[in-house]
Amino acid sequence: MVRPGSPTSLAMALAAHPERWRPLLDYRTDTRWYRLLDRNPYHEVWLLSWLPGQGTDLHDHGSASGAFAIAAGTLTERVVAAKPGRPLVEVTRSLETGRCRVFGPHYVHQVTNTGSVPAVSVHVYSPGLTVMNRYCLEPSGLCHVAVEQAGVDW
């Protein structure tokens, strides 16, 4: 079991030590691959692989906060912030090996491998994931389209 610590420190520490996760790593051409590395009362730790072109839809992690660190390759993160009475804000950033993103509850983003080589990332959620909300962008703004539940959808 991974000792309790901040999601950021855990994600960065694991990403920086490939000898701890490389033997577990896999790649799938039909979908993104992921594996639960640790779950305890404080957090969940996931390892994800991303072949070129693979990515997520716009989503959040429900009430969980967390961090994800790039262990290999480069990922592109698109963040969409929608606050009542304010214009929609979209920010896209390239995240290279060694970079880490921290997020709070209901942080809506999309992560994609837009590069030409595979990428690997370590994700830490605190508390563990129970739901993930899916979104789409409409001319009227951000629209909630689905809820995925732990134990049912992943």
Image (cartoon, grey):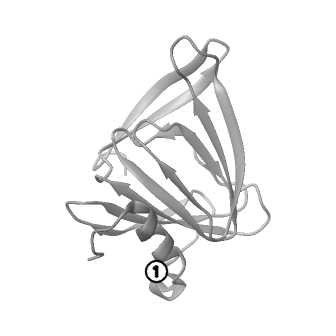
In this picture, residue 110 sits left or right of residue 105: right
Q: Where is residue 48 in the image (x, y as percent from the top left)?
A: 52, 64
Residue drawn 46% across and 67% down?
Answer: 11
Q: Position of residue 103 (x, y in %)?
A: 47, 47
The residue type indicated by label 1 comes to Leu
Q: Looking at the image, which is closer to me, 70 or 9? A: 9
Q: Position of residue 89 (x, y in %)?
A: 65, 27
Picture layout, residue 29 above or below residue 151: below
In this picture, residue 146 sits left or right of residue 55: left
| Disc 1, SS | helix
Residue drawn 33% across and 49% down?
Answer: 129
Q: Looking at the image, which is closer to me, 17 or 130? A: 17
Residue drawn 27% across and 50% down?
Answer: 151
Q: Position of residue 43 (x, y in %)?
A: 30, 60
Q: Looking at the image, which is closer to me, 137 or 108? A: 108
Residue farthest to the left, as pictured: 41
Q: How crowded is mark 1: few (under 14 residues within 10 Å), some or many (20 or more)?
A: few
Q: Quadrant of residue 64?
A: top left
Q: Quadrant of residue 100?
A: bottom right
Residue drawn 28% across and 52% down?
Answer: 127
Residue farthest to the bottom, as pictured: 19
Q: Locate the N terminus and report the quarter of the image it occupies.
A: bottom left
In this picture, residue 8 sits left or right of residue 41: right
> How many badges with numbers are in the image?
1
Residue at mark 1:
24
Q: Quadrant of residue 98?
A: bottom right
Picture layout, residue 55 above or below residue 37: above
